[in-house]
Amino acid sequence: MNNMRNWSVTVALSGFLFGFDTVVISGANLPIRELWNTSAWFHGTFIMSMALWGTVIGALFGGIPCNKYGRKKTLFWIGMLYLVSALGSGLAPDPYTFSFFRFIGGLGVGASSVAAPTYISEISSAKNRGKLVALYQFNLVFGILIAYISNYLLQGVGGANDWRFMLGVEAVPAAIYSIMVLGVPNSPRWLLLKKQDEQGAREVLEKMYDTETAEKALAEIRLDNTPEKGGNVFSRKFGLPLLLAFLIAFFNQLSGINFILYYAPEILEMAGLAAKDSLMNAISIGVVNLIFTLIGLRLIDNLGRKQLMLIGSLGYIVSLVMVAWSFYATASPILLLVFILLFIASHAIGQGAVIWVFISEIFPNRVRAYGQAFGCGVHWVFAALITLIGPVFIDKYRENPWPIFAFFAFMMVLQLLFTIFLMPETKGVSLEELEKRMVKEDKEKIA
């Protein structure tokens, strides 16, 4: 059990780099726009969302190295991508070079969102799988918090080059993570199903369980080691998990979470907070995100995935409606900040805690990496689109952006309906048993 936890913590550190890398750009947003005098469309496409387009590519194709070379090797090279991106972005002499290195970092983020949850789900038990996979989300939001704090502390260190320090400092945790991940073993399911290495799989399982439980787990995995269990992830029999992965990823981004995280300082300035205060208050977003992620981590294996999604959906709707009202009625900036923090708390305890766990569970062993890649790809396509058009909508609604938040609130009503009527509960069920249920349910729905 200790080995499972230690390996999961190490691999989940890729989530820290994920969170740090995606949000650190918020502190560099305005300085870079002023430095290179970019238009809203250029800034949204090449500066703010370029990393996310890399993330889309990394997510969509992350399943290939995961299956061919293994989860462990893929996780190591993800660390290298983060390292190169941090150094290159911090030293970039022009917006095009900057975009290239942000794209490289995005590849790491995308592949990480495939490889890390897949690996952790495969080296954990049904009892603690939710909690261990959610460690990835915890590290993600911890990375977001540290990025906000780092941006705040580095303001004024390099004058006009503050943003270079903000982006370049990520090289330090990237190097540490890359060294640490070399110490984790390969996934036993990958060893048996992809490498046909039963002895290697047994050795890893014996480090996870007692001998009897390890042999039982090996026997369950061995049942999947038949040709008819494989196939294309986009085949008809996997229709239900594909639909569930698409919808949970789609609604994750149509909540507006990345819009708020990426543009938090600018949104808070629009609400009437001074520039220095807005950067400081962005830290409060990171703190609330972390606290409620811890609560979600605590509850996910007790209440279950569906219950957390219900709680989060209701919180989303209330908070987004009130954010829209606060802008519309020009309410106090502090009141608006409170509702934004309620939104962040709702995300952290709901979608934030659930999405990576849920997608990593619902696909069968043999196509899990590709299924994870599909779900993550959908997530990042919509994240990139929203981030790309963010500056355009901010410019259009700069006087009063309430329609943006009203739209997000409406989408969360639809998410609530999805959760109530379509989303299954997956807590406490082995991956092999979930495979039987999902494929069976799919056949029944098709018939």
Image (spheres, rainbow, N blue to C red):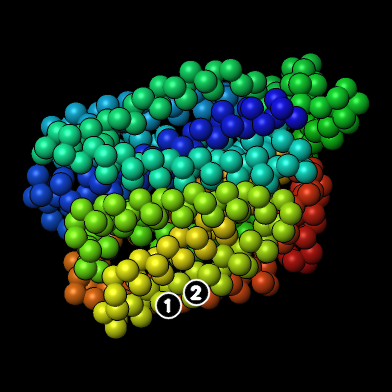
Q: Residue at x 61, y 21 (%)?
A: 184
Viewer-side residue, 42 vs 256: 256
- Evaluate whether residue 234 shows in this view: no
Q: Is residue 331 above or below residue 378?
A: below
Looking at this view, name the residue that lies furthest to the right: 212
Give the distance between the C-alpha atoms of the residues marked 1 and 2, in whole angstroms: 6 Å
**Residue type for callout 2:** Ile
On the picture, is 434 further left or further right than 390?
A: right
Taking 21 as reference, is 374 above or below it? below
Crowd tier of the residue under label 2, counting other residues whose Cα lies within 10 Å: few below 14, some 14–19, many 20 or above: many
Residue 28 % position (x, y): 22, 44
Q: Which residue is mark 2?
A: 317
Q: Position of residue 21 (x, y in %)?
A: 36, 39
In the rendered image, which quarter is residue 196 located in? top right
Quadrant where the image shows the C terminus: bottom right
Q: Is mark 1 in CB contact (under 8 Å) with mark 2?
A: yes
349 with respect to 160 (left or right): right
**Apparent side of residue 77 relative to residue 302 in the rendered image (left or right):** left
